[in-house]
Structure formats: structure tokens, C-alpha cells
Amino acid sequence: MVTELWTRLGLGLVCVAAWMIHPFSAILPGVMLALWTLLPILFDIPETPLSPEQLDSEAHFIFHGEPKQHFSHGEQKQNFRHGEQRQPFPSLMNDKAEVELSVVVPAYNELERLPAMLAESIEFLSGREANDPSRTWEIIVVDDGSRVSLDRVVLPIVEQYGSSKLRLMTLAINQGKGGAVRKGVLAARGRYIYMADADSAAKMSQLYKLEECLKSLEKNGHGIAIGSRGHLETESVAQRKWYRTLLMWGFHALVQYVGGVYGIRDTQCGYKLFTRNSAKQVFSHLHVRRWAFDVEVLRLAQSFQIPIQEVGIVWHDADGSKMNLSGMLNMAHDLFRIRYMYTTGRWKSQNKKISS
């Protein structure tokens, strides 16, 4: 704050001096002063504070079956309103991995599509574990403040398979996809952590491709394999309206030159696989809570020199998954916000590069 005050004071003095020489010579320092004053208002957006009750609600899940004795947030609690026992989520930052794979599914108003996605995912993961008992897993559904709570479709499945396999995290208010993914990842128990969308645009069987990719590039416990639709661009350009193609290439340019992510064709695919160490290093520094959070995730990973590789996956456009104009404008805003906040040092990544 002191540095900003002196900077504004210096620019103000330059403006006055320039005005005394010639009025037009004060334009440039005047614009710089205005930007230095306005940009924090546009980009330095504080998170919405939550009450202790809301924070407590987000930190616990409802369990069924034999509960695991893991109480990192205090004593086991009882939800007397529903007669259901509640247990605290573990901590990615403080606890060791307990299962092989955690699947984090952010969901907002997904009452219709989520049950089918969970059924397909559970069938695939259960089949793998039956063939190889070491391939243990969990799914964490993060209800991002849906208008109608997702517990009506998720809790019956929790009752069927147990909370050691499926857990529901309910956020008190809508925080955006990035905020939901971050909270889910920070509560994951897996040695590997997989981001997956609730719309089943890519089936869980595509996980094999990302696992093989990650196995080949993992270094010192670090690595990120990201699902990519880049191989579909040539085909889709022929079917897409010209202005959508223009927007696509414009977004690619913004990601590279504003967001600061280089060499990745598809930053926005919702399917990404992290080692536990990489997830810990990246998500502990994540700030963006909306659609552009993927860009910040990859920017951080590249700054830490974490190995990253894209792998093409089979993709099906899902109904209701198209981004509207408002979403595009918000994403552009967040890309400039990422550039501004890291350039000015308001956001910092403290961890050392993994190669050091």
C-alpha cells in the first residue's frame, strides 16, 4: 500500500510538472495515473466472506455406512435436523493420500445430468477396482450453490455405495467453477486427482489416456495431463460460424499474450489429471473462481516448471454447456485480471520450481 501511495504521488507530481511545461505533455502521465487508480478497482476483487456456520457446513460431508475415523477438524458432529451424521473432509495440504484416485466434479444446477454421469463413472471405477484392488477411488461432487440442492440426487447414491466412495460438498453460495474445483481438490484423498465435468462430455473411460500420459511425464512426484479438444479444431472450424471461429482464435491469443500460458492448444477442457503434489502446489495458490481458472492453473504450473502434456480425448458436445456472451466477457475480464494481479505482485506464487 505504501508503494502504491508513493507511485500515485510521483505520477501526480509528474502530471503537474508536465502541465506547467505544456498542457498536452500531461496527457500520458495523467492516463497512467488514472489507470493506476482504476485498475485495482476493476481487478482486485475480494472474496465474499462466509459466516462460521457456512464455513462449517462446507467443511463436512454426510456419511453412510462404516465411517472412516478421520477427524482433522474436531469431533464428529450430528446433523439433528436430518438425523444424519457428519464428518469433516480431510485436507490435501496436511493429510497423506488414502486412495489411488480422487475425481472432483463441480456441479451447478445439474439435477438432470449428474445422476447419469455418476452412474457411468461409478460403474467404470468399480470395475477397475474389482480387477485390481489397488485402484481405490473416491468421487467428490461439489454443489456450487445450486438453486435446488443436489443432495436429492447425490445422497441416495451415497447411501448405496457409502461415503468412502462418494461424497457431497455443498457450498453455501455460488463461487464459480474455479472456486468449486479448488475446494473439492483441497478436500481430496487421492494420490492422483482428476477434474471431470458433470455433463459427461467425455466418458470416464477417457481417464486411461490421461493416466498413460501422466505416467510417461511424471517427474519427482509432479505432473499434469490435460484432456484436449485441440485435435478437433480443424474439423470443427468447417462446421462453425465464421464469427465463432474468429472468437476462438481471439481467445487463444488472449490466453497466450494476456493470460501468460504458452504451448497449450486447449486450456479450457474440463478434464485434467494431477499428481497430489502438483495439485497441492497449484491449487493452494489459485485465485480465479470463474471460467478462466483453468488459465491460472496452467500459468501457475508453467511458472513452477511442472511437466504438462495435452492428450486428445473423445469429446461429445453436451446440451446446455455452451458459453454465452456474458461468460465470454467475464472470461476476458479474468484474463486481464490474471495479468494485472501477477504483474503488480498482488498475487504471488511462493513455492520453488520443482526442478530446483
Image (cartoon, rainbow, N blue to C red):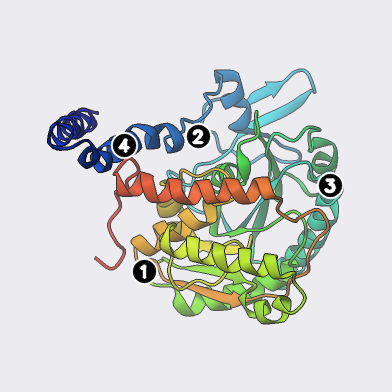
Circles 3 and 2: CB distance less than 8 Å?
Answer: no
First along the sequence among labels 4 and 3: 4
Q: Residues within 10 Å of mark 3 (few under 14, many from 20)?
A: few
Q: Residue at x 54, y 77 (%)?
A: 213
Q: CA distance from mark 3 to mark 2?
A: 26 Å
For residue 193, above or below residue 208: above
Q: Which mark is residue 160?
A: 3
The residue wearing badge 1 is 220
First along the sequence among labels 3 and 1: 3
Judging from the image, what secondary structure is the residue with disc 4 in? helix
Q: Residue at x 56, y 62 (%)?
A: 251
Seen from the viewer's position, the closer of residues 338 and 142 is 338
**Percent of width and height locating residue 201:** 76, 64
**Percent of width and height locating residue 150:** 79, 38
Q: Which mark is residue 263?
A: none
Q: Is residue 186 visible?
A: yes
Q: Nearer the viewer, mark 4 or mark 1?
A: 4
Image quarter of the C terminus = bottom left
Q: Residues within 10 Å of mark 2 (few under 14, many from 20)?
A: some
Q: CA distance from mark 2 to mark 1?
A: 28 Å
First along the sequence among labels 3 and 2: 2
Q: Residue at x 52, y 24 (%)?
A: 49
The residue wearing badge 4 is 36
Seen from the viewer's position, the closer of residues 309 and 70 is 309
Mark 3 is on which residue type?
Gln
The residue wearing badge 2 is 72
Q: Residue at x 27, y 57 (%)?
A: 352
Judging from the image, what secondary structure is the residue with disc 2 in? loop
**Percent of width and height locating residue 16:** 17, 29
- The quarter holding residue 236 reads bottom right
Seen from the viewer's position, the closer of residues 300 and 184 is 300
Q: CA distance from mark 4 to mark 3?
A: 56 Å
